[in-house]
Image (cartoon, rainbow, N blue to C red):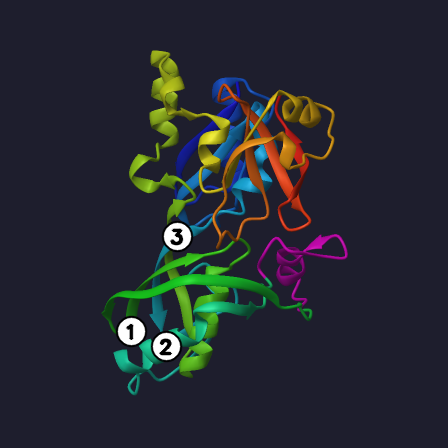
């Protein structure tokens, strides 16, 4: 059973809990999710099955889109509604102009510090365990990319943002930092992941829908082929010699390539490889400015 489900994660359930539920439903041992959603968050959660688990690292390279409801004037220790209020600020001087001005500072490539209440590990311990024990440590900042950050609606002190971002982005930290910049504090009141790569929330199914589909024995209609979720990546078609080279884990050179669809502005570090008859062979990594390719993951 190889492929990916586009699951609409419910509130109150962990991402791991969703995977565990699917394992029980379909009796598949090899399963995992791509990109954790906080328990209170909802929306698109890709769950990979069988050989699909081998492409999680590539799926996580793709962009994600979120709809975030934010309350200004309060900050919490978890940066969201599940935590304790740590401070309350004055929002009387905040208007939409100031919000838009502050949002501009978070677009593009930014440095972001992960929250203490996160799964990031410090000396083998998840930060959230340290936070629950009342321990706070210095965290290193990370580079993330905010491709798009838009103010969708506002009814101060509540605002709604739409964010398209790279992997590793903490929306809670973004909201917290926005509140710091405005000088009034802010926390994440509600979060929905509306898109993840090719997966859209309009097409996502609930665990109840999947359970019913399994009962009706038509669940396969919801299982995406492994390579379909990698359509954003560049593509190369190789000849028979290139296919044999991939099977052996050997470097591919221009003589192995029949055709290629490479975007000049591509920001992905990998490329899909196909045989002449359209069979998905695996993922390649460029060497020497995309003249030579190293097999990264092979599906034969």
Q: Residue at x 64, y 55 (%)?
A: 120
Question: Where does the image place residue 277, in percent across and percent down from the top left?
Answer: 50, 18
Q: Say if mark 2 contacts mark 1, CB within 8 Å.
A: yes
Identify the mark nearer the N-term, 2 or 3: 3
Residue carrying label 2? 73
Q: Which residues are magenta?
A: 117-136
* Disc marking residue 157: 1
Considering every residue shown, the one lying at the far right of the view is: 123
- Quick one: SS at disc 2? loop
Considering every residue shown, the one lying at the far front of the view is: 255
Question: Where does the image place residue 263, in percent across and percent down from the top left?
Answer: 47, 48
222 sits left or right of 109 in the view: left
Is residue 271 something one can see in this rendering?
yes
284 sits left or right of 63 in the view: right
* Disc marking residue 228: none
Residue 265 higher or lower than 204, as above or below: below
- Quick one: SS at disc 3? strand
- Quick one: SS at disc 1? loop
Which image quadrant for residue 27? top right
Residue 279 higher or lower than 272, as above or below: above
Q: Nearer the viewer, residue 145 or 162?
A: 145
CA distance separating discs 2 and 1: 7 Å
Q: Nearer the viewer, residue 26 or 226?
A: 226
CA distance separating discs 2 and 3: 25 Å
Q: Quadrant of the C terminus?
A: top right
* Disc marking residue 65: 3
Crowd rating for badge 1 (residues with CA inside 10 Å; few <14, some 14–19, many 20+): some
Whether residue 130 is in magenta: the answer is yes
Question: Where does the image place residue 19, in percent across and percent down from the top left?
Answer: 52, 32
């Amino acid at each position: 059973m190889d492929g990916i489900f586009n699951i609409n994660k419910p509130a109150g359930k962990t991402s791991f809990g969703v995977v565990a539920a699917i394992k029980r439903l379909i009796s598949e041992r090899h399963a995992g999710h791509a990109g954790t959603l906080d328990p209170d968050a909802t929306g698109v959660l890709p769950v990979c099955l069988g050989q699909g688990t081998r492409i999680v690292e590539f799926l996580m390279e793709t962009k994600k889109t979120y709809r975030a409801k934010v309350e200004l004037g309060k900050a919490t220790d978890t940066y969201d509604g599940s935590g304790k209020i740590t401070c309350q600020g004055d929002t009387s001087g905040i208007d939409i102009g100031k919000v838009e001005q502050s949002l501009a500072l978070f677009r593009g490539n930014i440095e972001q510090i992960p929250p203490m209440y996160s799964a990031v590990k410090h000396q083998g311990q998840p930060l959230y365990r340290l936070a629950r024990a009342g321990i706070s440590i210095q965290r290193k900042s990370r580079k993330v990319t905010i491709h798009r950050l838009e103010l969708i609606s506002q009814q101060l002190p509540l605002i709604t943002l739409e964010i398209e971002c790279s992997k590793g982005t903490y929306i809670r930290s973004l909201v917290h930092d926005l509140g710091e910049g405005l000088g009034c504090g802010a926390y994440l009141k509600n979060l929905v992941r509306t898109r993840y790569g090719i997966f859209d929330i309009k097409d996502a199914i609930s665990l109840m829908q999947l359970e019913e589909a399994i009962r009706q024995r038509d669940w396969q209609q919801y299982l995406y082929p492994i390579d379909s979720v990698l359509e954003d990546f560049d593509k190369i078609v190789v000849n028979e010699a290139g296919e044999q080279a991939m099977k052996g884990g050997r470097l591919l050179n221009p003589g192995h390539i029949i055709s290629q669809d490479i975007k000049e502005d591509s920001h992905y570090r990998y490329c899909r490889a196909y045989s002449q008859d359209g069979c998905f062979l695996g993922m390649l990594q460029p060497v020497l400015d995309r003249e030579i390719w190293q097999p990264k993951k092979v599906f034969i």
